[in-house]
Image (cartoon, rainbow, N blue to C red):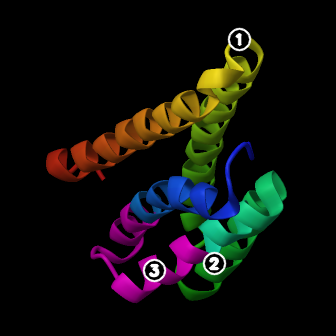
Amino acid sequence: MKPMSDFAYFIAILPVYLMGVILLSQIFFGRTKILYVIVWSLLGSTLSMFLSTFGEVLFAISYILFMVCIDNKSDMFWIFLFMDVNLIIVNIQTTAIEMAKTMSPINLNLVCWTSIIISDTFFCLFILWLFLTKKI
């Protein structure tokens, strides 16, 4: 999914990584570690921007290795779950953009940003709902 500049893609994917790593920080440590969230969110977004799906896989492997070394092997499940949800979000956005390219290239930017805003908002609302209901 690259009908936009690298900076725009980075801004579009960053909220997913931020909310996901905040949730993982809560699961792993029982609190939000600000520096931890910033570093891992920026790393994930940057790898995704430069290397696309390979970058997201590289991020997941790096994150899993880091967490196995400092915390617990059971953390791998939560990281895999987050990365699966992340890939689903990216695929939804890509599908909407590819459909817009074939049906209405004139409205490509509108469809692109609309799909990003809607999918990111639903993901963030889901994470917020998890925090409010304390299901984690």
Image position of 83 with respect to 64: above or below: above
Q: Is residue 47 left or right of residue 88?
A: right
Vertical side of 75 occupied by 133: above or below? above
Task: Kindly state the secondary structure of the residue where label 2 is placed.
Answer: helix
Callout 2 amino acid: Val
Quadrant location of the N terminus in the rendered image:
top right
Picture quadrant where residue 112 is located: top right
Q: Which residues are magenta?
A: 21-42
Residue 100, percent from left and from top: 67, 20
Give whichever of discs 1 and 3 has the lower sequence position. 3
- State the residue position of label 3: 38
Q: Quadrant of residue 94?
A: top right
Q: Which residue is mark 2?
A: 68
Identify which amino acid the numbered label 3 is placed on. Answer: Ile
Asked if one can make out residue 135 in the rendered structure from this viewpoint, the answer is no
Secondary structure type for disc 1: helix
Q: Which residue is mark 1?
A: 103
Residue closer to the observer: 122 or 67:
122
**Closer to the camera in the image, 39 or 98:** 98
Magenta segment includes 22: yes
Image location (x, y in percent) of residue 84: 63, 44
Residue 13 lies in magenta, yes or no? no
